[in-house]
Image: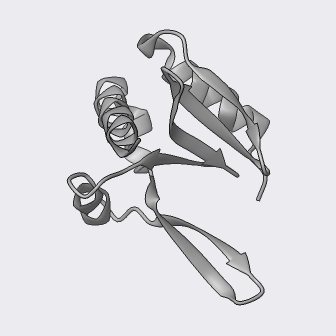
Amino acid sequence: MSASPEFVAYVREQLAALGPLADGKFFGGHAFKHGGTQFAMVMGNTLYFCVNDQTRSKYEQAGSEAFSYATKNGRVQVRKYFSAPAELFEDSAELLRWTNEAIAAAKGAR
């Protein structure tokens, strides 16, 4: 599912407090980068954050799901990216905390 331009603009607005972010399209999605490192992506109307072994359980406990896509051989899960809990968009400070964790996870994965 392609990234919704309206949702991408909304996410960009919500993350403006982080300062300059690079973002752009890729294979139907939209990537967000900080300091040259991709830490998030949008597919459809879903924001996915980069996770690592320390943060993945937080997402699982929140009911988030790993990014996945269909292939001719079945579904593939990308456990590096998990959906951001919807309630984060109701609390900008909490959204920025999770975003900073995603940035740290992405930079640690390089």
Residue 21, placed above or below residue 98: above
Q: Quadrant of residue 91?
A: top left
User: Position of 38 compared to 18: left or right?
Assistant: right
Residue 49, placed above or below residue 60: above
Colour mapping: one colour
User: Position of 35 compared to 91: left or right?
Assistant: right
Residue beneath the point at 54% across and 25% down: 36
Q: Count of labels shown?
A: 0
> Where does residue 5 sit, x and y in percent of width and height?
77, 35
> Where does residue 39 sit, x and y in percent of width and height?
47, 38
Q: Quadrant of residue 18?
A: top left
> Where does residue 56 sit, x and y in percent of width and height?
29, 58
Residue beneath the point at 69% across and 40% down: 30
Residue beneath the point at 31% across and 53% down: 52
Residue beneath the point at 67% across and 37% down: 7
Q: Quadrant of residue 23?
A: top right
| Frontmost residue, 5 versus 73 | 73
Quadrant where the C terminus sits is: top left
> Which residue, as the protein is rendered here, is positioned at the far left?
54
User: Position of 6 compared to 22: left or right?
Assistant: right
> Which residue, as the protein is rendered here, is positioned at the far front?
110
Quadrant where the N terminus sits is: bottom right
> Where does residue 25 sit, x and y in percent of width and height?
76, 37
